[in-house]
Structures are given as C-alpha cells and as structure tokens.
Amino acid sequence: FQAPGPPEIGTTHALVVVHRGRLVAERYDAEHSAGSTLPSWSMAKSVLCAVVGILVKARRLDVSAPLDVPGWPAGDPRRSITLDQLLRMSSGLRFDEEYTDPTHSNTIQMLFGEGQHDVSAYAEAQPLVHPPDTIWSYSSGTSNIIAAAVGRLVGGGEAGMRAFLHRELLDPLGMRSAAPRFDTAGTWIASSFLFATARDFARFGLLCLRDGVWEGRRILPEGWMDYARTPTAGSESEYGAHFWLARDGSGTFTATGFRGQYTIMCPRRDLVIVRLGTSMPEQKRGTYLWLKDVVERFPLLP
C-alpha cells in the first residue's frame, strides 16, 4: 500500500474483503480512504451486464435477439448481431483493443480522440470483419453500443439514464458514491467509466454473488449470473458475458479493469474482494498471484 508499491504489483489504493456477507478487512494507501471514489475502468462493463439483466427481467430486452442499432440500415449484415454476441465480445466487429499507440488503438480514439463525443457511433461505424459468433475478440466498443441501446430504451437522454441507474440498481444497493460518466451524446460510457468507493464496488460484487438478490429483493432475473458466468466459445473459457471467469474450476468470476481494478466473487468461499490500484500490464501476473493468495486464506464452504 506504499507508493509506488511492490515492483511486481504496483500501488494498491484500496482493498475491501466481504466474507459471508460481512466486511472483514479493509485497507487504503496514504492518499485514499473509505470515502474516496476511484475509477472502475472496465469493471463498468460488468455493471452494464447487470443493467441489461434488469431490462431482461422486465421483458424489455431479449439477449437472443438482434440489437436494434439505428446506424445499421436494413440489409446491413451487422443488423444480425445479437445482444448476447455483443455481451460476449463475439460480434465480429473490428475493434483494436490496444492501449498504447493512439494511431492504431480504437479504444484510445473512442474514449479520448475522434469518438469521444459519441462513443457508440464510433463503435457502430466499425466494419464487420468476421461472421458473428465465430471469433472472440475483447472490445470496449461493443459495450458502448449496448449502453447506447439501453439509453434509447430507457429514454430521457443522460438524465433519464442516470435516473434509471439510480432507481433500479445503485440506490437499492446503497451505492451512494457511484458516478457514471456520459459523453456529449448522452450515452453512459459503460466500457470504462463508473467511479465509486471500494465499499460500493463490494456491494455490487455481493449482489452478483447472491445471484442478483439484495436484502430479499430480486433485482436481476433468476439465473442471470449463471448466464453471465457461462464461458464464451473461443475465449479459452476465460470470458462470459461481460465478466471474466477463473479457469481453475472454482466458479470464481471477476469484474476487471485496466490498471488493476478487480471485484472478485468466489461462490465456493462466499467471498467478495475489491482491489483498486495502479498497476501496469506487466504487473498483472503479480497482482493476480497476490489476490489469489488472499482468496485462498478463506475456507471453502462445507
């Protein structure tokens, strides 16, 4: 927790551990506290998956149906892409998920370059380079296509989407710190931007661990997390529907973000771990091994 942190891990800003529904461990570095809101990066994708689940529960979305995208005209082969394929990153759309070279990175251009004012339109404009459901390729663009479609369905622009997020998900969980970021077009940039405290990310993790039930209230459809944890073909069993999956047979699944943001959910240990920090790609392995050690200090359920 001391900057710059161990060389194999980087700096950890916050660590929160919830075991059997109780907060059992919590620690911050010198610059942060329980009240500090920190970036999610791609952990926001997993929150988006929950929002989709809420609309599926209300029968307003169908994951097996093609997603209605106005930018794809009749006869465009992209109109066959389903919501499920977008959630699983198997849409076939071209998208270079690269984080260092802005001349080749669709992610950098979408978030900070030519696409930043309308992130969905930028992603929607990418061509189809593979038949849908044949190639797995991680893409932040697909998340923002989904986010824009959700926003159109909810209605009311940015204000309407903010109200929906708070009413249907954030407020029921008590995630009072949560702050989504929107682009100029009014789309929640759900690929990357939801700021919250470590405790509030842990609340979200506990909701997922409990199959979408919070204090007796079912927020997500029954079995939604089983769907989200079903491996996607071609991902080497590492990816479900906007959640990362452990390949060790443990059933552990994770919301993961660039620079070492993790919300880890371990059903076999009734455990949620949130780690927020600043880690470089080359420190991913070290961070993983450290968090694996933390996980394994908690007993398996009988």
Image (cartoon, rainbow, N blue to C red):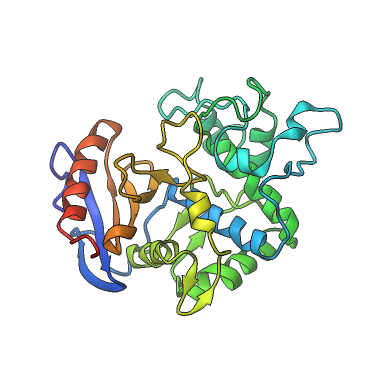
**Residue 129, quarter of picture:** top right
Against 64, is 114 above or below? above
Give the farthest residue toward the bottom: 216
Give the farthest residue toward the right: 74
Query: Residue 56 at what x, y percent from top left?
Result: 66, 59
**Residue 236, quarter of picture:** top left
Against 259, is 188 above or below? below
- Counting labels gives 0
Q: Residue at x 65, y 64 (%)?
A: 57
Query: Residue 230 at what x, y percent from top left?
Result: 48, 45
Between 77 and 189, the residue placed more toward the observer is 77
Query: Residue 7 at what x, y percent from top left?
Result: 14, 37
Query: Residue 275 at what x, y percent from top left?
Result: 28, 54
Q: Which residue is drawn at 78% across and 34% down?
A: 72
**Could you tell me if residue 184 is visible in this image?**
no
Q: Quadrant of the C terminus?
A: bottom left
Between 235 and 275, the residue placed more toward the observer is 235
Q: Which residue is drawn at 66% across and 23% down?
A: 131
Give the farthest residue toward the front: 302
Q: Residue at x 45, y 47 (%)?
A: 243
Against 23, is 297 above or below? above
Q: Classify residue 240 as left or right of residue 51.
A: left
Between 232 and 207, the residue placed more toward the observer is 232
**Could you tell me if residue 257 is visible in this image?**
yes
Against 177, is 120 above or below? above
